[in-house]
Image: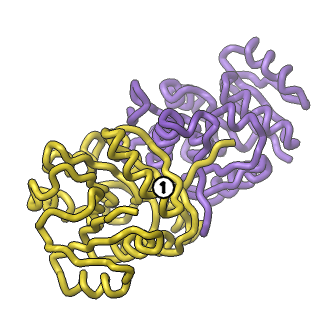
Chain colours: A purple, B yellow
Amino acid sequence: MTTISIIGAGNMATAIGTRAAKHGHTVELLSRNSAKAQSLADQIGNGTTVGTYGAKPAGDIVILAVLYTGAVDMVAQYGDALAGKILVDITNPFNADATGLMTTTGNSVSHQIATVAPDDAHVVKAINTIFGHVLAKDTPLDAFLAGDSAEAKAGVAAFLKSLDMQPLDAGGLEMAHALEWAGVLLMGVARNGAGFDVVLGAKSL
Amino acid sequence: MTTISIIGAGNMATAIGTRAAKHGHTVELLSRNSAKAQSLADQIGNGTTVGTYGAKPAGDIVILAVLYTGAVDMVAQYGDALAGKILVDITNPFNADATGLMTTTGNSVSHQIATVAPDDAHVVKAINTIFGHVLAKDTPLDAFLAGDSAEAKAGVAAFLKSLDMQPLDAGGLEMAHALEWAGVLLMGVARNGAGFDVVLGAKSL
């Protein structure tokens, strides 16, 4: 298995880190709040480490498990420390009541991250259509992804598969905005009868 | 069962009309091209009728099975003939390469239809996330819907259920744009590995 770096120590970092460790990956946690990261590393166990926030992450795949409001600035501040990395954008830039987005077509959070990231980093949008507590259940589910680098998407897809998640490639980075809208759709069905254990997916008939 | 009116005589009209007739509904077809409507009515059989285009449809539920480019003008031209009806907007206002939309937040095709429709008509977005040939297979599948009228949505949901389609309420009319983006997502996954027999859905874990 591989080393997965996760920037963040909140709910999504917990869910992804726990699921990744359970499936044999080595998890590295990175957070401005190193005490919180250490506490989460202890909780996850399985050799989970805490890295130095701002330094080059250990994993080839770096999951940006922070709120959308901070993700772009964080990547900009990291700068060249993210050179060559696959950056997984899991953010949902919801508007105030989660019926729409703060982003616009061609300017998804993924686009904004790609703009400030090192040239040889690759952004993949993924996992934003799954509630953290659903991810934490460790049951099989579908996971949409989008990005311009076929190689980076293959890497993320292999990681998702190793976690019993069925990757569904939606296309290039321009489709990241469609995934952000899928996050809105998820919230919509959850609040209108489906409940918050719901997950989006796709199947062939 | 109920009478369902379908405006249009193309692929989606064929798929919806065939599936509705198979499940015991009486189908009325309405088209500018009455010869095409009659030919489709003969194909569907089961008592399918052809109504007078522009006159009051027989069904309480009127499915607007036309391209998005013509849907708004058509509803405007119908005018008061659609008073009190549930108008089902199934359109996908894709951009040229179907990676985005011609509509914007707060101005989905459903919003535009609601603006020109009679005051006591109710617009429900639905069925736009299902390919016609997948709908025609008559296998169980999920169907998202959105609209402001709970009563109209209940009517559409009952109709969908009667066709072995699991209705998933996404919320008010503001969510119609999220459903339009879900149409984009469907195209994306279909073209990037999932294939064109794919259908979107949601399940509780």
Q: In this image, B167 relative to B128: left or right?
A: right
To which quarter of the image does residue A74 belong?
top right
Residue B123 coordinates in the image, percent (x, y) = 27, 48
Most distant residue in the top direction: A35
The subunit carrying tag 1 is B
Please determine whether, in this image, residue B54 is positioned above or below residue A131.
below
Residue B23 coordinates in the image, percent (x, y) = 47, 69
Assign the N terminus of chain B to one quadrant of the image. bottom left
Most distant residue in the right direction: A46
Determine the residue positioned at 26% across, 54% down.
Answer: B87
Disc 1 packing (10 Å; few <14; some 14–19; many ≥20): many
Is residue B193 at least partly visible in the picture?
A: no
Determine the residue positioned at 44% across, 46% down.
Answer: A177
Write down the residue under mark 1.
B143
Report the number of numbered marks.
1
Label 1 element class: strand
Closest to the observer, B51 or A90 = B51
Identify which amino acid the numbered label 1 is placed on: Ala
Please determine whether, in this image, residue A125 is positioned above or below residue A94.
below
